Amino acid sequence: MKITLNGEARELDEDASVTDLLEMLQVQSRQVAVEVNLELVPRHQHPARMLASGDCVEVVTLVGGG
């Protein structure tokens, strides 16, 4: 399936979840915020939130500092 990830077209397996995507990107879910189709996906929902062809996904890395 085709999704848009941070503004770029990407190809994923048909049965991919948010967790699968993060594993593919080699990022830990506690270090990022994920939005699918302009809707924030809470971390506890990442494994169950399945992606669909045409979804627009934003993965934002959280940065601490002061």
Image (cartoon, grey):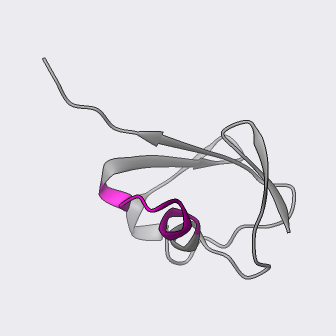
Looking at the rendered image, the quarter that the C terminus falls into is top left
Residue 48 point in image, percent of width and height: 55, 77
- From the image, which quarter does the N terminus lie in? bottom right
Residue 44 x %, y %: 39, 68
Prevailing secondary structure class for the magenta stretch in the rendered image: helix
Q: Choose between 26 and 50: the one closer to the eye.
A: 26
Vertical placement of 43 versus 8: above or below?
below
**Image point 35% across, 61% down: which residue?**
28
Left or right of 36, for residue 8: right
Indicate the quadrant where residue 3 lies.
bottom right
Give the residue at x 73% y 36%.
7
The residue under the point 67% across, 76% down is 16
Farthest residue in the top direction?
A: 66
Left or right for 51, reference 39: right
Residue 29, horizontal then vertical, whole percent: 38, 60
Which stretch appears magenta?
Answer: 21-30
Q: Residue at x 52, y 59 (%)?
A: 25
Taking 41 as reference, is 35 above or below it?
A: above
The percent coordinates of residue 33 (x first, y second) are 44, 46
Looking at the image, the residue that sits furthest to the left is 66
Q: Is residue 8 highlighted in magenta?
A: no
